Image (cartoon, rainbow, N blue to C red):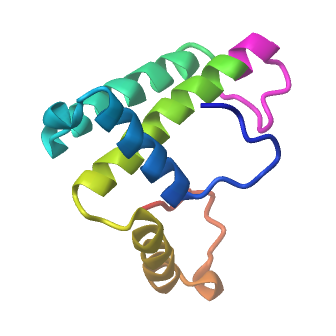
Amino acid sequence: MTGRGDQSVSLDLLKQKMANFAKERDWDQFHSPRNLLLALVGEVGELSEIFQWKGEVPKGLPDWKEEEKVHLGEELSDVLLYLVRLSDICGIDLGKAALRKVELNAIKYPASSNTNDGIAHTS
């Protein structure tokens, strides 16, 4: 697997790459939803460790060393890849589900009702 430069990468491409990767190694037998979810949680833990003692971090990570940013990218990628694989194994179109969720959030949190209360509202 090689980098794709500045090209956009689709969820479908990642899904196919992950399916091929697992098949080539005969790992499909281990990729149950439960196992993939537990692996995903483990990767989220590794991602959390990167931020654990840094306090608040400004956008763009201006004070981070390049190797710290590379490590962050690797851990973010692990989380994404397990999430893509989990959604594939569960038969969920992750892109469509995410777009639907954004639409539902727009209804739940309409822009016109923004009270600018300083609270980040997420779902």
Q: Nearer the viewer, residue 9 or 37?
A: 9
Q: Residue at x 72, y 55 (%)?
A: 8
Q: Nearer the viewer, residue 122 or 70?
A: 70
Magenta residue span: 56-69
Q: Residue at x 30, y 37 (%)?
A: 23
Position of residue 39 measured from the top left corner of the image (x, y, whole percent): 28, 29
Visible residue check, residue 55? no
Quadrant (top left, top right, bottom left, bottom right) of the N terminus: top right
Q: Is residue 45 above or below residue 40?
A: above
Position of residue 54 measured from the top left corner of the image (x, y, whole percent): 63, 17
Position of residue 96 measured from the top left corner of the image (x, y, whole percent): 44, 74
Visible residue check, residue 47? yes
**Dominant secondary structure, magenta:** loop
Compared across the picture, whether 59 is left or right of 11 comes to right
Picture quarter containing residue 82? top left
Q: Residue at x 24, y 39 (%)?
A: 37
Decide whether residue 57 is among the magenta residues. Answer: yes
Q: Is residue 90 above or below residue 79?
A: below
